[in-house]
Image: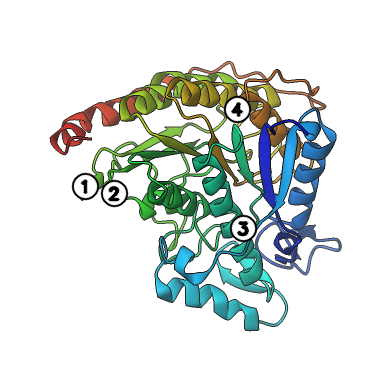
C-alpha cells in the first residue's frame, strides 16, 4: 500500500455504548408501540465505517486500533471528579439517564476512553505528518463535554483532548474548527481562558439548552482572560444551507484562521446540519459538506498545516450522515465528490444568514486589540 491519504482510528468498544430506545431522546412512551432508537446509536458508526471502506477512499485508508485513553491523558483537559463520575457509570444496570438527553450503560466508560484515545492517536498522527487526514471514529462524541460536565451525548471532550495533545507535541497555536449543527460549547469551555487555542464553532443559533449547556454560542462570547479574542462563534439562523455555510467560512472562519496562523488544526466534523437530520434544522447537502471540507483543507495547506486531526461529532440521519461524512473527508483531501446524493435537496436561497456572519465578524474584529496586546 502506498502512503495513506487517511489514517483512521477505530475500535469495536465504541459500539458497546448503549443509549437505549424511546420517544426521540426522552425515553419510553406508553403511547408508542415501536420506539425509535436513541439518535446517537451504534449504527451511525457502523454505516460511517462501511462508507469509508466501500467508497473511493477505501484503498487509501490505513486502519488502526484506537487505544484507550488513560487517566493522565484525560486529566489534561478534565477534572479528577469528572473522570471519576464517568468511570462510576461502569456500575450501572441497564440504560440510565445521565443528564437531559444523555443516556449511558455499563459499557459507556470503556467506549468513552476508546473514543478519547482515538482522538489522541489522531493528534499524534497529525503531529507526525503521517497522513493528510488523521481520523478518529469517535463514539460517544465529545464537543459538548466540558472540563467537568457531561452534556449532549458527550462524556470526554475528544476534540479538546486532541488540541491539547497537539500543543504538547510542540504546536504553539492550535485551531479547532467545528461545523456540527450544535454549538461546540464543551470545547469552548476547555479553552475559554487559553489564547493558544482558537476555538471556532459554526452552528445553528439554538442558544443554551439547559443546566449543562448554559453557553449561548453567540458572537459576543469571545473568551476571557488570556483567551479573550480566541473564540469565534458563527450562529446561523434556522434553515441555513450550503450558501450560508460557504459564506460563513469565506467571510469569517477562513480569515480568522489566516490571522491566527495555527500550526495545527483539529476538525470537529459533525454532519447534523443536513436537511434530513432529526437533531438539526438546517439544510446542508452532501455537496455543501464537501465544500466545507474543501475550504478548510485548502486553508490548512495554505497555512502549512500538512495533516489534519479530525474527530467525528454529531450526525444522526443513520444513512445520510455517513455519506455526508465521506463527502466532507473527500473535500478535506481536495478530492472531487464522486458519490451521488441519493436524496432530494431543498436549495438554500435565503440570505437571512448575512447579518449573522456580519455579527461574528464584528466580534472577531473587536478581539483584535486583545490578541495584539498579548502578542498573539
Q: Do the residues bearing badges 2 and 3 touch, measured as CB atoms within 8 Å?
A: no
Read off the residue under disc 2. 194
Residue at x 54% of width, y 25% of height: 297
Q: Are marks 2 and 1 in contact (CB under 8 Å)?
A: yes
Q: Which residue is mark 1?
A: 226
Q: CA distance from mark 2 to mark 1?
A: 6 Å
Dividing the picture into quadrants, the one containing residue 176 is top left
The colour scheme is: rainbow
Label 1 crowd bin: few (<14), some (14–19), many (20+), radius 10 Å: some
Who comes first in sequence, dot 4 or dot 3? 3
Q: Say which label, 4 or 2, has the lower sequence index.
A: 2
Q: Position of residue 3 (x, y in %)?
A: 69, 32
Q: In whole angstroms, how far apart are the C-alphas of marks 2 and 3?
A: 24 Å
SS at badge 1: helix
The alpha-carbon separation of the residues under discs 4 and 1 comes to 31 Å
Q: Position of residue 143 (x, y in %)?
A: 51, 51
Using the numbered discs, state the Cα–Cα distance from disc 4 to disc 3 in whole angstroms: 22 Å
* Element type at mark 3: helix
| Residue 115: numbered disc | 3
Q: Secondary structure at mark 4?
A: helix
Q: Tags 4 and 2 in contact by the CB under 8 Å rule?
A: no
Quick one: quadrant of the N terminus? top right
**Viewer-proximal residue among 248 and 111:** 111
Amino acid at each position: 500500500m502506498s502512503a495513506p491519504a487517511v489514517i483512521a482510528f477505530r475500535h469495536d468498544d465504541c459500539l458497546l455504548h448503549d443509549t437505549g430506545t424511546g420517544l426521540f431522546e426522552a425515553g419510553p412512551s406508553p403511547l408508542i408501540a415501536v420506539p425509535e432508537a436513541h439518535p446517537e446509536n451504534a449504527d451511525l458508526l457502523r454505516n460511517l465505517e462501511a462508507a469509508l471502506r466501500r467508497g473511493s477512499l477505501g484503498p487509501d485508508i490505513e486502519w488502526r486500533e484506537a487505544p484507550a485513553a488513560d487517566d493522565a491523558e484525560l486529566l489534561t483537559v478534565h477534572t479528577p471528579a469528572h473522570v471519576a463520575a464517568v468511570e462510576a457509570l461502569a456500575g450501572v444496570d441497564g440504560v440510565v439517564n445521565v443528564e437531559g438527553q444523555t443516556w449511558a450503560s455499563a459499557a459507556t466508560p470503556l467506549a468513552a476512553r476508546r473514543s478519547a484515545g482515538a482522538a489522541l492517536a489522531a493528534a499524534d498522527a497529525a503531529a507526525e505528518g503521517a497522513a493528510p487526514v488523521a481520523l478518529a471514529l469517535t463514539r460517544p462524541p465529545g464537543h459538548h463535554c466540558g472540563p467537568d460536565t457531561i452534556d449532549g451525548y458527550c462524556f470526554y471532550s475528544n476534540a479538546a483532548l486532541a488540541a491539547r495533545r497537539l500543543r504538547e507535541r510542540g504546536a504553539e497555536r492550535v485551531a479547532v474548527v467545528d461545523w456540527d449543527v450544535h454549538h461546540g460549547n464543551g470545547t469552548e469551555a476547555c479553552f475559554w481562558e487559553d489564547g493558544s487555542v482558537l476555538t471556532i464553532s459554526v452552528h445553528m443559533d439554538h442558544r443554551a439548552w439547559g443546566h449543562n449547556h448554559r453557553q449561548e454560542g453567540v458572537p459576543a462570547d469571545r473568551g476571557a482572560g488570556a483567551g479573550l479574542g480566541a473564540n469565534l462563534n458563527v450562529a446561523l439562523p434556522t434553515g441555513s444551507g450550503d450558501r450560508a455555510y460557504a459564506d460563513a467560512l469565506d467571510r469569517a472562519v477562513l480569515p480568522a484562521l489566516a490571522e491566527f496562523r495555527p500550526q495545527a488544526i483539529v476538525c470537529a466534523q459533525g454532519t447534523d446540519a443536513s436537511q434530513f437530520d432529526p437533531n438539526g434544522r438546517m439544510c446542508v447537502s452532501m455537496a455543501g459538506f464537501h465544500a466545507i471540507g474543501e475550504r478548510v483543507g485548502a486553508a490548512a495547506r495554505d497555512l502549512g498545516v500538512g495533516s489534519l486531526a479530525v474527530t467525528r461529532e454529531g450526525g444522526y440521519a443513520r444513512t445520510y450522515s455517513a455519506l455526508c461524512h465521506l463527502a466532507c473527508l473527500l473535500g478535506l483531501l481536495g478530492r472531487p465528490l464522486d458519490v451521488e446524493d441519493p436524496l432530494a435537496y431543498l436549495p438554500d436561497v435565503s440570505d437571512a444568514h448575512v447579518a449573522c456572519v456580519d455579527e461574528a465578524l464584528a466580534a472577531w474584529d473587536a478581539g483584535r486589540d486583545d490578541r495584539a496586546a498579548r502578542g498573539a
